[in-house]
Image (cartoon, rainbow, N blue to C red):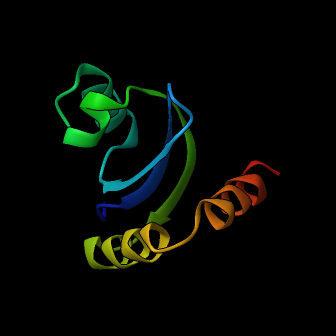
C-alpha cells in the first residue's frame, strides 16, 4: 500500500484558517486540538476540518500547501466552498 499525503485547512475558534499537510488528517487534527501540532493552533484553537486534498507524495502535498498559504482569505474560502459541494 502506497502512503498518501494530505493538505488540509482548519477553521479556528476566532474564524481564521490554518493550512497544513500530513499523512493522517484526523490524527493531526487531534494534535492541533491538544495544542501539540503548531504554534499558530496553540493560540488559535481549531474547531473543524474544512478542506482536505489527497496526494501521492509528500512533495506534491507540500507544494500545494505552499500554494494555498499564498492565497488570499477570499480565495481560500472559495476553495473551501468548492470542496463542500
- The image position of residue 59, as x and y in percent, is 27, 78
Q: Residue at coordinates 51% horizontally, 41% vertically from top-left?
A: 16
Q: Quadrant of residue 55?
A: bottom left
**Residue 29 in view (yes/no):** yes
Residue at image position (36%, 79%) is 63
Q: Position of residue 64 (x, y in %)?
A: 43, 74
Residue 2 picture quarter: bottom left
Q: Position of residue 38 (x, y in %)?
A: 21, 41
In this rendering, position of residue 79 left or right of residue 8: right
Does 11 sit left or right of 29 as displayed? right
At horizontal 39% and vertical 34% (from top left) the residue drawn is 26
Give above or below for 35 relative to 80.
above
Quarter occupied by residue 39: top left
Frontmost residue, 27 versus 13: 13
Question: Image quadrant for the N terminus?
Answer: bottom left
| In this view, 45 is above or below 64 | above
Rendering coords of residue 15 (x, y %): 57, 35
Amino acid at each position: 500500500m502506497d502512503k498518501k499525503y494530505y493538505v488540509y485547512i482548519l477553521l479556528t475558534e476566532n474564524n481564521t484558517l490554518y493550512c497544513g499537510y500530513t499523512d493522517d488528517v484526523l490524527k493531526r487534527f487531534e494534535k492541533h486540538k491538544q495544542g501539540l501540532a503548531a504554534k499558530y493552533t496553540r493560540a488559535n484553537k481549531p474547531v473543524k476540518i474544512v478542506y482536505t486534498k489527497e496526494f501521492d507524495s509528500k512533495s506534491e502535498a507540500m507544494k500545494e500547501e505552499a500554494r494555498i498559504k499564498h492565497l488570499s482569505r477570499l480565495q481560500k474560502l472559495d476553495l473551501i466552498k468548492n470542496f463542500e459541494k
